Image (cartoon, rainbow, N blue to C red):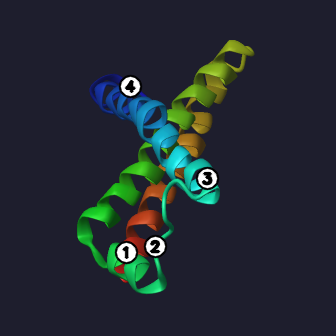
Amino acid sequence: MKGRYKALWWSLFAIGGMVAAMLYPAHILATQLLAPTGLVELPTWEEAHALFSNPLFRLYLVVLISLPLFHAAHRIMAAVMDFGLRGPYRTPMATILYGAAIAGTAFTILTMVTM
């Protein structure tokens, strides 16, 4: 994570943290707490199909899934560095973690495009 790409990874970390802090609680509240209690009505099959056909909802799902992956990769990288795995382990660890976040993002985008 040298020089010129450091700002990219930091911005993805920050945006992913914001998504995890702001969108996840609202999403969990609506789908896991309010819907089972009957305060929010669950969509029918046709309504759910229409919702998943909407490109804006697909973009929301890409943001909801992919950006926290980069946040988690950066957090795990910081934890690994705190445990003392520095020096020659830094580059392979960063490659694995950020590569997994990129692969997860690519898989999410591919799933949303082909859905």
* Residue 2 disc label: 4
Residue drawn at 66 percent across, 28 percent down: 89
Q: Which mark is residue 52?
A: 1
Q: Is residue 1 above or below residue 114?
A: above
Circles 4, 3 touching at the beta carbon (< 8 Å): no
Q: x, y (%) of residue 110?
A: 40, 73
Nearer the observer: mark 2 or 4; the answer is 2
Pinpoint residue 80: horizontal percent, then vertical percent. 68, 23
Q: Which one is in front in this view, the residue at disc 2 or the one at disc 1?
A: 2
Residue 40: x percent and y percent? 49, 57
Marks 4 and 3: which is nearer the front?
3
Q: What is the quadrant of the C terminus in the image? A: bottom left
Distance (Cα) linking label 4 and label 1: 39 Å
In the image, 79: left or right of 46?
right
Q: For the residue marked with disc 4, what is the amino acid?
A: Lys
Please report whichever mark, 4 or 1, sits nearer to the chain's N-terminal start.
4
For mark 2, does the 10 Å Cα neighbourhood hold few (<14), some (14 to 19), or many (20 or more) residues? Answer: few
For label 3, the residue is 32
- State how far apart marks 2 and 3 are (Cα): 14 Å
- Where 33 sits versus 15, above or below? below
Pick whichever of labels 4 and 3 is earlier in the sequence.
Answer: 4
Q: Amino acid at mark 2?
A: Pro
Q: What is the secondary structure assignment of the residue under circle 2?
A: loop
The answer to which of marks 2 and 3 sits earlier in the sequence is 3
Instruction: Label 1: state its secondary structure.
Output: helix
Going by the picture, which residue comes out furthest to the right? 83
Circles 2 and 3: CB distance less than 8 Å?
A: no
